[in-house]
Image: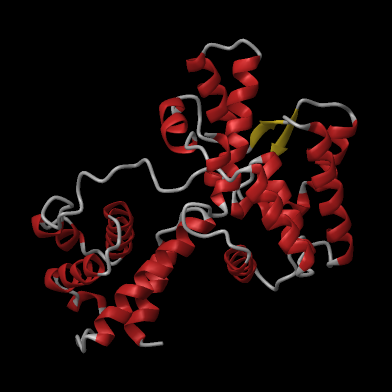
Amino acid sequence: MSNIKKVLQQLARNAKGSFKTVHDREVIIGRLANYLKDNNIQVKNVEHIKTKHIEGYIQSRQTQRVSKRTLQNEMSAIRRTLSQAGREKLIKSERLSSKTLNIHNASRQGTKIAITDKQFEAVLNKAIENGKEDIAAALQLCRYIGLRGAEVVRCNQSLKTWQTAINESKDTLRVVFGTKGKRPRDTRIINRERVKHAVDYAIKIVSKQNGKLIDKPNLKQTMNYWHDQAKTLGLTGKIAPHSLRYAFTHDLMNYYMEEGYPEEEALAMTSMDLGHGDGRGHYIKTVYGKKGEDDE
């Protein structure tokens, strides 16, 4: 790894944030450093990075047909990283604004859709057939509790607590580890039988794997393993790991609507169960509400 890449990635880490945010930022910054190297752009330290270098990087990504929304996220990561080096003047340059770079007016609706029951069953069976019981356990927890990837790989610390809550007929489970902003949330139990099976199954796996659901040396390797295995099982494109959480969101919305809540309140409560707060109901409806083929 070149020296400038090491420096940039250290700055990316220093900018802090959730594990996923920091990890994604490091990946983006590493891609920028590779672009500089591949194009023989001699940059020995952060002070030598110029506006034209970042413009060139974004242009190269545009030729790869990377979406505007993704490029907005990449620019955000670049700005946050360079801010750590005191390059405020550079990152505030009008030439690097979203409008000038032609990455503005991007939709936040996303490209993912909820996984259907038929698709989920196929992916789950494939994981079991491939001997990936840890991934099979993670898949069920994501689908029936609505866990994010960072939450499911760290949920071993909560499994016994969840088991107790289920056995005591509690209505919700508290998600603590791996949450965004380290904000715990209570998520509603929709299908008690499936949730109980998923938690009991995960506890069985954890008992055989040094107390871990996914037995890897560190969190970064654990997350990489989860994403790689999910991709191997076919969770890519519109049907990605997050599609499991989308499907759980549909369960939540249907539950609250059937309980007689007005749509606006049902969406607000769904949003809170997902850890978004009560003000993102419209976002939940337009982004998470996309249905898979079997639901049309």
The total of numbered circles placed on residues is 0
Q: Residue at x 35, y 70 (%)?
A: 29
Give x and y (percent) for residue 167: 90, 33
**Could you tell me which quadrant the N terminus lies in?**
bottom left
Is residue 195 shown left or right of residue 27?
right
Q: Residue at x 45, y 29 (%)?
A: 285
Give x and y (percent) for residue 87: 21, 64
Q: Residue at x 10, y 55 (%)?
A: 100
Give x and y (percent) for residue 118: 66, 46
Give x and y (percent) for residue 237: 47, 57
Residue 271, compared with residue 55, is above or below; it is above
- Front residue of 267/92: it is 267
Is residue 185 shown left or right of residue 35?
right
Residue 129, compared with residue 291, is above or below; it is below
Q: Residue at x 37, y 75 (%)?
A: 30
**Residue 153 in view (yes/no):** no
**Residue 282 in view (yes/no):** yes
- Front residue of 131/29: it is 131
Is residue 75 shown left or right of residue 180?
left
Colour logic: secondary structure
